[in-house]
């Protein structure tokens, strides 16, 4: 079966209409289904995106390939395994304790990196698969002044019990406790404390077991996370192709392997960051297919040690747009979320996240098997796409 793109370029069809956007979500989440990083289904999603872009007259699409694992478990489990190896080495005398302390400290640091959006060196231990970013550049009609990059990821995560309603709020506390246990284990090796070493090892074994148990769930359809965002970028791309901005170049970047550690965003910055995107603004579309539209004013990250904020320029732009368009009802929310903006901010780039928030204050169906096409609201898709375009137009107007 060939996945046919929605015909948004047809005369009289508004590419930002909710039903038009919903067809893109359906093609990705229903026709293709779960799209694990590096698997064939993720490649099919890229094929669909290329066809949809071609249908609106965009044929210059840059593919940026890279290697990835298919889950974030490697980034979390391998540091714990490293720390536990340090506990075993601690039984081999003074030299063993010194090596064990070093491994425990390294494990704590690597777990913090994994919970903070930074690249995890140990993810190379897992099976490597082929993923890629797709990059589109829409130049301005007049004199260039700004670059804005819109991000949406193509891959999906698993159904995770750690993201159930009863458990997800405790994730930062649990991860912080694991980092503390690893650090305490390193201290125990330094002082030769057997009882402290035993306690911290038990905590780490429990953490490792929980991570492995969390991997038993199936990969989800990802209608909201993140086919909804891909649909918004395709709609905005169609609108800009028909009427480019005057002074702002817009990049549409469909990133791969976000759920495996934001590897697509790291790859984008590695190649283009310093030379072309250092002064650019970034807007990350995240789970915008249901609920009220908000921007994340503070991200707690996945530990109490890894919070981050959008930059002041991005906050100013989103607030100015929200004030000029009050009918969208957009406001700031503090959320526990780890996304592409974590990678951007850790590496010194600007960035802000647009997200859909449900009545319970959380993104809907996040990493749950309910993340399916039947739970997507066309009006939420349209709201996110139109507000994203309004942000670009607000910036462009200021450059005149």
Image (cartoon, rainbow, N blue to C red):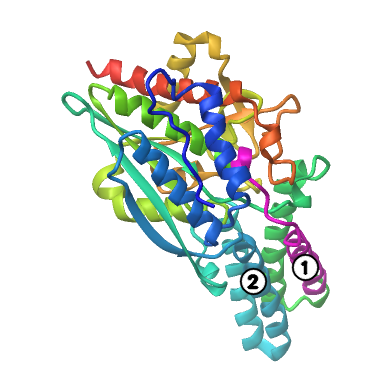
Residue 338, visible in the rendered structure: no
Res 270 quadrant in image? bottom left
Q: Secondary structure at mark 2?
A: helix
Q: Is residue 213 magenta?
A: yes
Return the residue found at the far left: 143
Residue 8 screen position, x and y as percent: 43, 29
Q: Quick one: label 2, few (<14), some, or many (20+) residues within 10 Å?
A: many
Give the image quarter of residue 345. Answer: top left
Query: Within the image, what quadrant is residue 11 found in?
Result: top left
> What's the magenta region?
197-225
Check disc 1 and report its element: helix, strand or loop.
Answer: helix
Residue 176: which disc?
none
Q: Residue furthest front?
A: 1
Tell me the residue at 74%/46% (across/down). 369
Q: Residue at x 70, y 54 (%)?
A: 175
**Up-down relation of residue 204 to residue 396 (above or below):** below
- Which SS does the magenta portion mostly show? helix
In percent of width and height, residue 351 lies at 43, 36
Can you identify the residue that label 1 sits on? 200
Q: Which residue is mark 2?
A: 104
Q: Is residue 377 left or right of residue 194?
A: left
- The relative height of residue 262 versus residue 230 in the rendered view (above or below) is below
Q: Is residue 62 visible?
A: yes
Q: Is residue 201 left or right of residue 58?
A: right
Mark before the other along the chain sequence, 2 or 1: 2
Q: Residue at x 72, y 72 (%)?
A: 188
- Residue in the picture at 67% in, 64% down: 183
Q: Residues within 10 Å of mark 1 (few under 14, many from 20)?
A: many
Quarter of the figure with the C terminus: top left
Name the one closer to the observer, 130 or 315: 130
Give the residue at the far bottom of this rendering: 92
């Amino acid at each position: 079966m060939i996945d046919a793109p929605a015909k948004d370029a047809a005369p009289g069809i508004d590419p930002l209409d909710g039903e038009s956007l919903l067809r893109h979500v359906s093609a990705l989440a229903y026709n293709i289904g779960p799209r694990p990083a590096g698997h064939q289904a993720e490649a099919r999603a890229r094929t669909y995106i290329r066809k949809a872009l071609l249908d609106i007259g965009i044929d210059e699409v840059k593919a940026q390939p890279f290697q990835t694992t298919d889950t974030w478990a490697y980034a979390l489990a391998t540091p714990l395994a490293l720390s536990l190896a340090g506990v075993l080495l601690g039984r081999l005398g003074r030299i063993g304790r010194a090596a064990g302390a070093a491994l425990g400290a390294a494990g704590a640091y690597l777990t913090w990196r994994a919970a903070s959006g930074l690249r995890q060196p140990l993810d190379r231990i897992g099976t490597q698969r082929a993923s890629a970013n797709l990059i589109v550049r829409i130049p301005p009609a007049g004199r260039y002044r700004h670059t804005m990059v819109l991000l949406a990821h193509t891959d999906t995560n698993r159904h995770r019990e750690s993201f159930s309603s009863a458990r997800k709020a405790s994730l930062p506390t649990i991860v912080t406790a694991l980092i503390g246990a690893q650090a305490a284990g390193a201290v125990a090796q330094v002082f030769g404390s057997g009882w402290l070493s035993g306690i911290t090892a038990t905590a780490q074994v429990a953490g490792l077991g929980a991570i492995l148990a969390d991997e038993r769930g199936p990969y989800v359809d990802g209608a909201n996370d993140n086919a909804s965002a891909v649909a918004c970028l395709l709609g905005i791309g169609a609108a800009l192709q028909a009427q480019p901005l005057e002074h702002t170049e817009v990049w549409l970047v469909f990133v791969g392997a976000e759920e495996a550690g934001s590897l697509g965003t790291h790859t984008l910055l590695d190649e283009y960051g310093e030379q072309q995107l250092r002064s650019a603004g970034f807007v990350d579309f995240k789970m915008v297919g249901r609920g009220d539209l908000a921007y994340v004013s503070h991200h707690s990250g996945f530990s109490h040690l890894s919070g981050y904020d959008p930059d002041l320029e991005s906050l100013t732009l989103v607030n100015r747009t929200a004030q000029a368009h009050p009918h969208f009802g957009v406001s700031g929310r503090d959320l526990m979320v780890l996304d592409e903006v974590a990678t951007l901010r850790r590496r010194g780039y600007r960035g802000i996240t647009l997200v859909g928030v449900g009545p319970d204050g959380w993104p809907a169906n996040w990493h749950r098997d309910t993340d399916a096409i039947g739970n997507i609201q066309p009006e939420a898709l349209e709201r996110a796409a139109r507000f994203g375009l309004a942000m670009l137009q607000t910036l462009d107007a200021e450059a005149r």
